[in-house]
Image: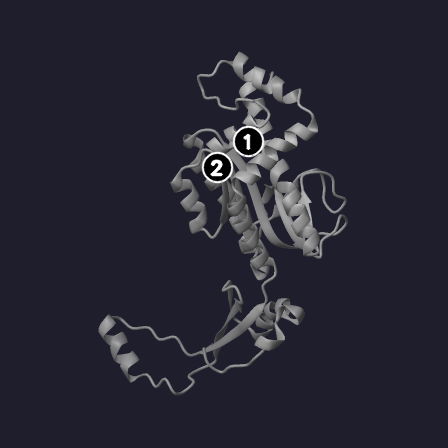
Amino acid sequence: MAQSPAHRFGQIIGDVLETAIEPILADFARQHSLFLDKKGPRPARKGRKVSWTDSYGNIHDLDYVLERGGSATEIGIPVAFIETAWRRYTKHSRNKAQEIQGAILPLAATHQSSAPFLGTILAGVFTEGALRQLESQKFRVLYFPYDSLLSAFKEVRIDASFDEDTPDSEVQRKVSAWERLAARQRSRVANALLESHNEEVRAFMINLESSVTRYVASIRVLPLHGVSSSWKSADEAIVFIKSYDDFMVHGHLVRLEISIVYNNEDEITGKFATKEDTLAFLENYRGPQLAPANRRQSNTI
């Protein structure tokens, strides 16, 4: 089936978004000795897609992943998952937000020991509700509104506006005008988009840098001991609690609770039934991640 002009022009806008963002991420990766995985061949994985598997065995295709210790031939530790998307109509924006969450949140949970940065770079028409939904799930959002896209395309004298009633012939003229442009002219559109939201781009990158350069400020350890008690009513439970001697350790070790707190206030928690599992978890945080000035022991929470 032939591709519709509207679909093709949508791809063009998506390409402009990637052309604008990808060099910034690549430069950031070089500055911080990270590997930027993106669509395309990479000996360390199969195919051209950036695919990661969550703890349930589900595969998620992503746009960009920043890895510590990664290379063309070796998969590293993910420190940032970043998705890009553009939508023309509000009716699609909430679904796209949910799609992004569905792809990234299970991976963030799978790799919680590295507490990866969660980023979305959006363009076009997204409702406030869709943006708030992502932000409520701890995503950092960089958003280029539809009008900003139109202004950027005007740099090369293309009217990028269209809707569901725009004739295919008119959209095809926009596609043809774009395809006649030289690479230098196409770059002008991407650069204009970035310049129109320079402060927002800067804030997004500052948040990304804060995440990947953070260090462990403190590690809190809470051993929990006790024997479970069961009562038939709230009154009986109240009597038990009032008479409970909280200055004595009762029973065997139930579990250990660990809280890793970073200097940027990110926090990772874990609950473990055995010392062995706890030690295995803490091995991920040994070495340079723990800032010497902040290394301390405490018997209290």
* Neighbours of disc 1 within 10 Å: few (<14), some (14-19), many (20+): many
Q: Nearer the viewer, residue 249 or 47?
A: 47
Residue drawn at x 52%, y 34% as measured from the top left: 86
- Vertical order, 14 against 45 (above or below): above
Q: Nearer the viewer, residue 186 or 219?
A: 186
Question: From this viewpoint, is residue 4 visible?
Answer: no
| Circles 2 and 1: CB atoms closer than 8 Å | no
Q: Mark 2 is on which residue type?
A: Lys
Residue drawn at x 60%, y 44% as measured from the top left: 59
Query: Does residue 75 appear to the left or right of 220 in the view shown?
Result: right
- Vertical order, 163 against 232 (above or below): above
Question: From this viewpoint, is residue 156 visible?
Answer: yes
* Neighbours of disc 2 within 10 Å: few (<14), some (14-19), many (20+): some
Residue drawn at x 25%, y 76% as measured from the top left: 238
Q: Which callout, 2 or 1, points at the residue further toward the start of the chain? A: 2
Residue linked to disc 2: 96
Could you tell me how far apart the alpha carbons at marks 2 and 1 are, in whole angstroms? 23 Å
Q: Secondary structure under badge 1?
A: helix
Residue linked to disc 1: 152
Residue 183: percent from left, percent from top: 69, 29
Picture mark count: 2
Which quadrant does the C terminus fall into? bottom left
- Vertical order, 296 against 37 (above or below): below
